[in-house]
Image: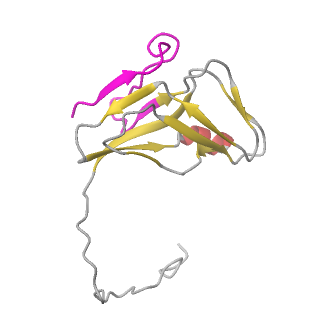
Amino acid sequence: MKLQWKAVSPKIGREIPAPYYASRGAAAMDLHACLDEAVTIPAGGRALIPTGIAIALPSPDYVALIFARSGLGIKFGIAPSNCVGVIDSDYRGEIKVGLHNSGDADYTVQPGDRIAQMAILPVVQAVLEQADELDETERGAGGFGSTGRN
């Protein structure tokens, strides 16, 4: 699949890397902070970080999902504030990543830092059909740990 993208900042491809897959087997591409200066996210705080790019998904059959970078999450508690960002197929604006600092220390994002990763996945849009009853299953309505602890 071809994904069209454009730089919405003149820094992309010069001072700030364009999105790229870090390895041949990578499922998601790295996104970078397109900043004029460093941004410090206080412990427990949030910040909206621009990436300097916009994309054009080819049809409603695709979605771009924004995920945390595992190293930032594990080492520093830095992850998208909405857990997973959803970029719909008809959105053409700049991709920005809301980051949350769940760590106990302030974290500074420098211009060009890798801040998140973006995966392109297929979408199935459901045809909703209201029902008076749903079919029965062994699990039923059990949730929130009802199938066991491990």
Residue at 36% from the left image edge and 39% from the top image edge: 91
- In this picture, residue 80 sits left or right of residue 86: right
How many numbered marks have been drawn onto this rendered protein structure? Answer: 0
Nearest to the observer: residue 89 or residue 136? 89
- Is residue 143 something that shows in the picture? yes
- In this picture, residue 121 sits left or right of residue 100: left
Is 27 one of the magenta-colored residues?
Answer: yes
- Which is the main secondary structure of the residues drawn in magenta? loop
- In this picture, residue 45 sits left or right of residue 57: right
Q: Quadrant of residue 75?
A: top right
Is 114 one of the magenta-colored residues?
Answer: no
Residue at 45% from the left image edge and 31% from the top image edge: 94
Quadrant the N terminus occupies: top left
Nearest to the observer: residue 115 or residue 62? 62
Nearest to the observer: residue 127 or residue 40? 127
**Percent position of residue 122, x then y:** 26, 49
Query: Magenta stretch?
Result: 1-30
Residue 28 vertical position relative to residue 122 in the rendered view, above or below: above
**Percent position of residue 45, x then y:** 72, 44
Residue 24 vertical position relative to residue 91 in the rendered view, above or below: above
- In this picture, residue 33 sits left or right of residue 29: right
Residue 13 vertical position relative to residue 52 in the rendered view, above or below: above
Residue 110 vertical position relative to residue 124 in the rendered view, above or below: above
- Is residue 22 something that shows in the picture? no
**Percent position of residue 136, x then y:** 31, 89
Q: Quadrant of residue 132?
A: bottom left
